[in-house]
Amino acid sequence: MYVREAHPTDEWQMKSNVKDDVCYAQPKTLGQRVAIAKDFSARFKFLLPFGIDDMSNAADNAYAAWPERLYVIDETGHVAYRGGMGPFNYKPAEVREWLTARYGAVKHEPASAVATPPSTGSAATSSSSRPAPATTAAALTRATSTK
Amino acid sequence: MKRFLKWFGGILGLLLLAAFGVLCYMAGSPKDAYGMVRYALPHMHRGTLKVGSDAPDARLLALDGSSHFHIRERISARPLVLVFGSFT
């Protein structure tokens, strides 16, 4: 669920953004958001379904999501888990615990380093290849595939 | 009276300076402290959702840039994990 950028170049950019080559201005149009989302998806080979919030930030406002937050919605359409506000209270381990309590522990495959292709989207400012971090969201969904 | 206002202003100034110093320490630098106050705080909000609340619906754009879907369309026989975030 892609929401407004947390540390864009034209607002509060941090040193880590420059170090990690994640330098984007705050998108002003939905097309720019899509371009950045595509860059992210390509760089980290993100396999999960992607949803991009519109420019009215409807999803962000409804879920108080910015800058990052985790939720679990149960089968009845109710909030089953509400994570804390990121970055300090963003805890994927808590979602893992919830899923483990629901479905039991799963055997995790070792995370493999993924080679990253250079960014090609219009929002990219430079190209680089660097191993991508393991996506915790992908690891979490593996827990739901076993029972 | 004038002297009192002078002292009051001085103490208030010192307190504000100390608060800014603490903020700089928390944020990492004066630039980050400014960034936090100027850009982050206006967008941070606790929200009203609690465990048990109805999950709000919202219309989202798919990564292809043209098709849309609603959050509630993805609610099914399995729990739905929503991972909110951005690239930077």
Image (cartoon, coloured by chain):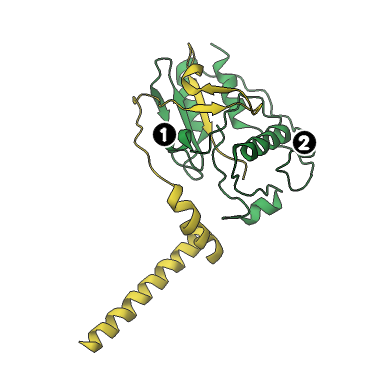
Chain colours: A green, B yellow
Q: Please tell me which residue lies in front, B25 or A126.
A: A126
Q: Position of residue A32 (x, y in %)?
A: 64, 40
Q: Position of residue A116 (x, y in %)?
A: 77, 36
Residue drawn at point x = 38 percent, y = 21 percent: A78
Specify the amino acid type for callout 2.
Thr
Specify the amino acid type for callout 1.
Ala
Left or right of B63: which side holds B34? left
Q: Secondary structure at mark 1?
A: helix
Q: Position of residue B18 (x, y in %)?
A: 41, 70
Quadrant occupied by the C terminus of chain B = top right
Q: Secondary structure at mark 2?
A: loop
Among all residues in the image, which is located at the extreme left? B1
Chain holding disc 2: A
Quadrant occupied by the N terminus of chain B = bottom left
Chain holding disc 1: A
Residue drawn at point x = 57 percent, y = 35 percent: A2
Q: Which mark is residue A62?
A: 1
Q: Position of residue B37 (x, y in %)?
A: 46, 58
Left or right of A131: which side holds A24? left
Q: Residues within 10 Å of mark 2 (few under 14, many from 20)?
A: some
Quadrant of res B68: top right
Residue B21 vs A121, above or below: the answer is: below
Residue drawn at point x = 72 percent, y = 33 percent: A42
Q: Which mark is residue A116?
A: 2
Same subunit, labels 2 and 1: the answer reads yes
Residue drawn at point x = 49 percent, y = 64 percent: B24
